[in-house]
Amino acid sequence: MTEKEMSRCILNGDTGNKRSVCESEQIDEQAMLHKIKQSAEQVEVPESLLPESILKKCRELEQEKTGEKKLWFRNPKLVGGLSAAAVFIICFISLRGMGTGNSAAIADKSSAPQMEITMTEGAPEMSEEYEPMEMEEAAEEPMMFDEAADAGAGAEEGYAERKDAGELYTLAGSYDAVYEKLEEVKTNLNTARNGGLIVNDMAEMEDAAFSAGVEELRKENAQASAEEAVKYSETNVQTFGIDESDIVKTDGEYLYLLRGSSVNIVSAGEEMKQVSEVKPETADSTANVCAMYVDGDRLILMVQEYTADLERTESEDVAYYDMFYIDTGRSVSVYTYNISDKEKPVLAGRVTQDGSYVTSRKDGSIVYLFTSQYLLEDYEKDPADAIPEVNARKVSADCIYVGEPGERALLISSLSIYSPETVRDTVMILDEGSEIYMGGDSLYLYRTNYRETMESTQIAKFSLTGGFLNGEAAASVRGVIRDTFAIHEKDNKLRVLTTDMSGADRENCLFLLDENLKVTGELTHIAVGESIYAARYLGDMAYFITYRNTDPLFAADLSDEKNPKLVGELEITGFSEYLHFWGKDKLLGLGYETDPKTGQQEGLKLVMFDMSDPVGLKVLGSLVLQESSYSPALYDYKEILVSPEENLIGFVAESYNKGRIRNYVLYQWEENGFEKILSEKLDGDGYDTANYRGLYIGENFYIAHPEIIRCYNRKDYDLKQTLTFR
């Protein structure tokens, strides 16, 4: 039965006996529609069905039921269409009811599925862009109109009314406000060219800064699921439950390796073999896959693409010839593939966003894409060209936040992996550049602010509700966030560790902020003369490392939001650049051993701290890798494997004492020390050591690189197989 036939059955009020109604009613469709239209035009629309009445009622319902997921439309014109449709159906029911007596079935709530509709103002009309999900997609995730609608450009499509992020970022409201900020930047630059000073520091935006949260319920669910299936390692992340992209992924059955412009899918059975290669079809031969996620039968790729156009210079001066130049553009496309058949991946959808790839995150089925773009050059050519596009639509002015004058636009878009051709929401941040931290509940943008001799960190908070971003609050705290794990969200509240170097001597600070980013408690003058090198938060405790020539580990009790307290301090030689919880009562550190008198580094160092008693912190054991002087894992947490459950600690270690020697080393923790269980030389590969990953699937351990995979038996760690890609 076709959809039109099914619709006719439903309108006839008989969903249970399709044959008796649908086959007996042989009505010419065009004639029927003409008759209905004539009848509809003669019916006076009741006041309750007028567009403005429906909108008013919907707003009242929305206020009463804030937070519930609703089926919603986004355009008042569409609501007007709904009024006409309502009259249309009433007339149709009247016509059919006079002839068949079935109109009562329409009012019977038990005869058809019920659907609650909430309508909000200000979104594009129903058009070709509002294509519903395919039926196979709908079976995997409940159908919602907000997922089927392209909110890529923002426009008037707010899920809720946009709000300012405190005073740090305010909504533009119009493109003129954006142009004013860009004009101010242009004036400052011109002043600088003429010998003046630029007040604003055009800071470079770095990759995301995230913290490791502990969400007990989600953790228990994840552990329960893991116990039922083959155990395998996952990408090391900073916020528990928020996935991050990496160059190597596994789902427990296959390995996925990102190789520049493509991804190889490799079977991880008894014998490794490549089953397929996924290469996005782009018009740009230099396109590069810069991020990858795997979720069930979905493979999500972020692809950096480039465009080039030949432009002619415009000048008022008379010239004998024209000057031409190549104008380049950048965009990032999110390609989503259905990989239910690993040998034949199928493209399920694609969205495109202007700018250069910054980072991305994945929370459940929602992917967040961050790109950046400088706007001043386009603004100087034509102000209208300065507004970036998402899915070929300019970002709406009421979805743009402006901060201090700056020419860098940070675009943040969200999409569902089950609606891969549409964007849920987009916001644009215009300022000098900020760093990014995504907690379990909110997104935070933070940046260092230098004013004369004072340095501070400005923080803006945005809520994340089903993929929709909205400004919440802003704050400023003293000092600079030096470690990516030093900022952390718990219960929608924020904790921040900073190092303040603006005084006579540097000092460290701890700040506790509430839901509105109001400081409720603080600790200052911590470890004067030293700097924070590493930090972690667990429950109501904060652990952090400071360093000058020795390595103090501090423990702070945060349970009293107004009066945080330092409760423990332990001083050892060397320092840790990276901390990772090892169960509930231990803390693993990776860093360097140093001479306590001179501070000279003496090799990589592993240390295991006992934090079962925060007041009496102690070292359970340590190991100095005297022949190793560097590891990329110290500066990229994705490059270290830490699995307390499987008792594995793996990373690349490099030595320069007798030329460059590179090894992947794997350790396990015994009662009072570290034991090496694998060391694999990597020098013969000739590849960048930053691209190696250690991972496990069941009884196999892998040292994986986009160009080569080694598989070991975990019983004795003998090499089983090597697979090389050419």
Image (cartoon, rainbow, N blue to C red):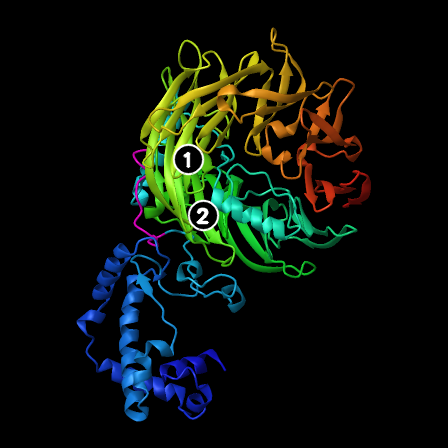
- Going by the numbered disc 2, the residue's amino acid type is Ser
Residue 372, label in figure = none
From what the image shows, is residue 606 above or below residue 137? above
Q: In x, y percent, where is residue 66?
A: 30, 53
Q: In x, y percent, where is residue 75?
A: 31, 61
> In this orientation, which residue lies closer to the viewer: 176 or 243?
243
Instruction: Give the quadrant of residue 346.
Output: bottom right
Q: Tag 2: Cα neighbours inside 10 Å, few (<14), some, or many (≥20)?
A: many
Q: Which residue shows up at 64% across the image and 33% down it? A: 640
In this rendering, position of residue 684 left or right of residue 207:
right
Does 618 lie within the magenta span? Answer: no
- Going by the numbered disc 1, the residue's amino acid type is Leu
Q: Which residue shows up at 31% across the image and 36% down it? A: 516
- Main SS of residues in magenta: loop
Residue 445, label in figure = 1
Q: In x, y percent, where is residue 499?
A: 45, 20
Which residue does the numbered mark 2 point to in the structure image?
413
Q: Give the range drawn in magenta.
A: 155-169
Instruction: Give the quadrant of residue 95.
Output: bottom left
Instruction: Give the quadrant of residue 683.
Output: top right
Asked if one can make out residue 264 in the rendered structure from this viewpoint, the answer is no
Helix, strand or loop at mark 2: strand
Q: In x, y percent, where is residue 64?
A: 26, 56
In this rendering, position of residue 129 left or right of residue 717:
left
Does 167 lie within the magenta span? Answer: yes
Q: Which residue shows up at 30% across the image and 36% down it? A: 166
Q: Tag 1: Cα neighbours inside 10 Å, few (<14), some, or many (≥20)?
A: some
Helix, strand or loop at mark 1: strand
